[in-house]
Amino acid sequence: MARSRRQQSSPLGPLLYLWLALSMLLNVAGVASIVDGLVHWAAFFKDFLNIYRTFVREPITWGAYLIWPVSWPKIPAWGFDLLIIWSLIFLAANICWIKKYRRTMIGDLIGRNGVLAGIVQTIVAFVTYPFFLAHSLAAPSNAMQKRLATQTSVYVLVLISAVIVLAFLNWQLRHLGH
């Protein structure tokens, strides 16, 4: 009986162990490549955030503090990040506005209402447009409002995606030489 068990398990035994060892090696290599990819992405995002801070947030912060009274409380860093996101949404809204009216939003508002009223309306639009966009996406009052909100959201996503893809390609090219 001992001989029949050994005869039954011996032809598959070495192949089975080889197959299991090869599978384990391939699994470990696959996990290692995923981790390696995550390490590259983590390094990319770290560099991306450093570049963002150096070339986007710090100049805006420096410019804001030139006119900000010293006695007033400091603006938190997230306030400048919010300003940048608001500006991105406003840029996307302006792209839609240019497509529809063939003028920028500020140019159109100044042309219709005069310089002072146009500038005030543009500032109000800048501050309130992200809320209007969110409301238009969630509960639009008509199909045109929904279409305009969707189009603006697509432009926002395209702008963000383009910046990230270009930054990643630049980062990859820079690190290819290392």
Image (cartoon, grey):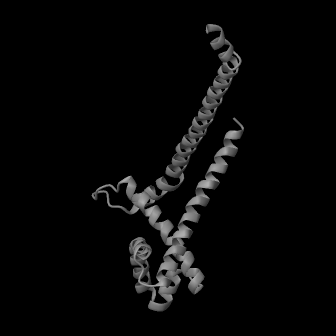
Say which residue appears at 32% left-offset and 55% top-offset: 74
- Using the image, determine if residue 6 lies above or below residue 84: above
The C terminus sits in image quarter: top right
- Depth order, front residue of 54/5: 5
Q: Indicate left or right for 82 with 44 as reference.
A: left
Kindly identify the residue that appears in the image at 68 percent across and 43 percent down.
174
In the image, 80 versus 97, the foreground residue is 97
In the rendered view, would you say 124 is above or below 15? below
> In front here: 70 or 14?
14
Image location of residue 44, percent across then percent down = 58, 44
Rendering coords of residue 95 (x, y %): 57, 75
Q: Is residue 41 left or right of residue 12?
A: left
**Image quarter (top left, top right, bottom left or bottom right) of the N terminus:** top right
Residue name at image x 64 percent, y 28 percent: 23
> What is the x, y in percent for residue 88?
50, 66
Q: Compared to 29, does 63 lie above or below?
A: below
* Picture quadrant where residue 75 is located: bottom left
Give the residue at x 60% y 32%: 32
The answer to whether 157 appears left or right of 25 in the picture is left
